[in-house]
Image (cartoon, rainbow, N blue to C red):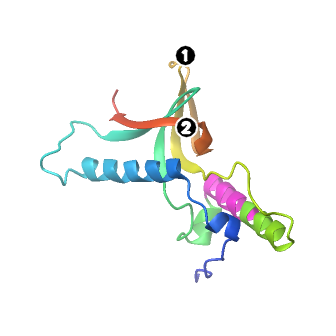
Amino acid sequence: MENEPTKKLANLLNERVDLKAITISALDGVLKVINSGKIEQIKVPHKLELVILTNFGYITGDYVDDLGNNDDPELIFNDFNKFMFTHMFEQRNSLVERFEAEGGLRRLTNDGGVVYLRNVEVKPFSNPQNSIHFGDLCLFPDQIVGVTAKNNID
């Protein structure tokens, strides 16, 4: 199948940048380089993983930088979570574009991006033994208070 041309986003979506989401993306990139073992001066005995701190607890998972933009639509359709979240963002973007075109939307509120994670574990501070697992999770950056890394065996 041929990929459709990338649809132009509404200006309200296209002209915003979420600093927390970019910071998480940057940290994920650094962790991938460290985990690859390509830097001789830095060796870690176990894979480092991204940890996102919230007021509720901490979250670990595989950061997804670009949800479905380059994937075969057939593959997305066969992965329920990826299908659901890809189409959720497409519908959101279409609604914002329509509101903007009708002149009824001049600015967004709660307009931070989202951090998309796969293979997610959420551990509440109040009871870390009672963790919750999700296949996929969209985390709104306004809930994030910090990021770090830890060995995946900690």
Q: In this picture, is 81 found above or below 126?
A: below
Q: Quadrant of the C terminus?
A: top left
Q: In this picture, is 44 found above or below 123?
A: below
- Nearer to the camera, 47 or 108: 108
- Picture quadrant of residue 69: bottom right
Question: Residue type at mark 2?
Answer: Ile
Decide if residue 80 is on the left or right side of residue 129: right
Q: Residue furthest top?
A: 126
Disc 1 or 2, which lies upstream in sequence?
1
Other residues around mark 2 within 10 Å, as few (<14) / some (14–19) / many (≥20): some
Q: For residue 84: magenta?
A: yes
Q: Nearest to the eye among marks 1 and 2: give it.
A: 2
- Start and end of the magenta stretch? 79-91
Pointer 2: what residue? 144
Pointer 1: what residue? 127
What x and y, as percent, mark residue 32?
32, 51
Q: CA distance from mark 1 to mark 2?
A: 19 Å
Instruction: Determine whether the residue tagged by mark 2 lies in a helix, strand or loop.
Output: strand
Q: Residue at x 61, y 77 (%)?
A: 6
- Nearer to the camera, 103 or 35: 103
Q: Residue at x 17, y 44 (%)?
A: 42
What x and y, as percent, mark residue 99?
83, 66
Decide if residue 63 is on the left or right side of residue 68: left
- Nearer to the camera, 107 or 10: 107
Q: For residue 113: magenta?
A: no
